[in-house]
Image: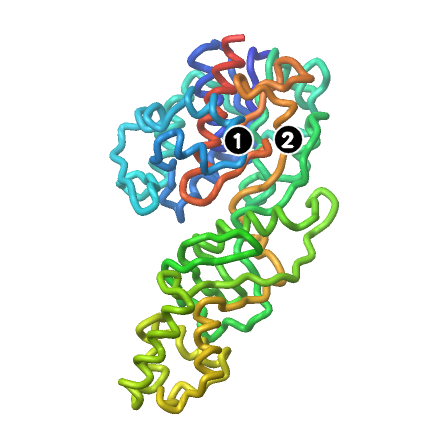
Amino acid sequence: MKEYDIAVIGGGPAGIMAAIAASQNSSSVILLEKNPSLGRKLLLTGGGRCNITNSKPIKKLLNSYSQKNFLKHSFYSFTNEDLLSLFDLEFITEEDNRVFPKSGKSSDILEGLTDYLKDVSISYNFEVTSISDEFVINDKIKANKIIIATGGITYPQTGCDIKNYSLTSQPLTDIKYGLVPLITKNDLSDIAGVTLYDVVISYKKNNVRGNVLFSHVGLTGPGIINLSNEISESISYNLLENEPEIDLEIAIDLCPELTREDLADKFNRDFQTNGKTMIKNYLKLFLTNSFIQYFLNQCNIDGETQLSRINKKAKNRLIENLKHFIFRITGFNDKLAKVTIGGLDLKQVNPKTMESKPIPNLYFAGEVLDLHGPTGGYNLKIAFSTGYLAGLSAALK
């Protein structure tokens, strides 16, 4: 049986970073990966471009997470500057503070990270099925300390598996889908591929501003993806036991810069001065062309109707739908979920070391914990910072 000071389970972003930090302070580290290669999920992030982090200042960055108090120490222990300095690459910052390698290749990030693993033993195609009380893994490897970075349940083709949560006796919160496209009752085939830009999407008291993209089966895009976390968390389900049952409404404000009163005043003026204009042409002031016909169908208004012939009820219907356009949601497009909501209960983990409170010398990092953020580099930031802190803490103990 081979023995190591530290064994890291999981070769994703958190596990790789944990192994790097551990190896820089310990002479005996092994990284166990169930796939034939490292970083499969990392290669998929940012559409294959790797949105490696978000460049907001730490205080503002932390305010984007509901678990900000837990994350504070890890974020200050391993900052964005620390992360980006690891690479001999140029980075660019795009809309919403999203940071990408200038090359646009996530493979460059993975290669840069693996260069730091020269002093780490790596065992591929190694699926961990058991960890004994003496820290013996699969009856083959013994470690003094173990770091679990096995991820959540999304993208099972990358090695994520619901069975990973049973590797320890640590308590769990409910496991749910996060950053996931929504399936609608509405037939959207006629507008698949159309994007609504900078709209406000609402669910109950939650409002998110961003873009909405229509697919053949439902809604996606940054605005929808971020709102999906609020929807998922509001529904009672646990993927360890059952799938969610969904039947709810969301609304889109298609003209967030104008109030209903503003629209009413504008309609009253324009419908008089431009009475011969057809409504389908007039709505180009507010909507993208390829969405107008679908919108009018939902309002039950003929697009060739002249403004002067639209009665008060139809006018009010247009205003209401411009400010509160409803979609019925019947499911999550779970195969495209980007993160997992829920995981190992943070109350049982020391945020200053990532060490288990009930089980000494056992550490956790990344998505296996009950940690998640919005889309835009926030979740990789969690992985890298908690991974670094776990690896460092395990090595220095």
Q: Nearer the viewer, residue 254 or 327?
A: 254
Residue 95 point in image, percent of width and height: 31, 47
Q: Nearer the viewer, residue 297 or 40?
A: 297
Residue 12 point in image, percent of width and height: 50, 33
* Callout count: 2
Instruction: Please state if 139 lies on the left or on the right of 145 as rendered.
Output: right
Task: Give above or below for 59 relative to 285.
Answer: above
Task: Give above or below for 193 relative to 294.
Answer: above
Residue occupying the far right of the picture: 241
On residue 366, the disc is: 1
Amino acid type of the residue that numbered disc 2 sits on in the rendered structure? Leu
Instruction: Please state if 276 lies on the left or on the right of 351 as rendered.
Output: left
Q: Secondary structure at mark 2?
A: loop
Residue at 34% in and 35% down? 55
Task: Give above or below for 125 relative to 178.
Answer: above
Residue at 55% in and 61% down? 250
Amino acid type of the residue that numbered disc 1 sits on in the rendered structure? Gly
Residue 195: tell me if it is visible: no
Residue 256 point in image, percent of width and height: 39, 61
Label 2 sits on residue: 344
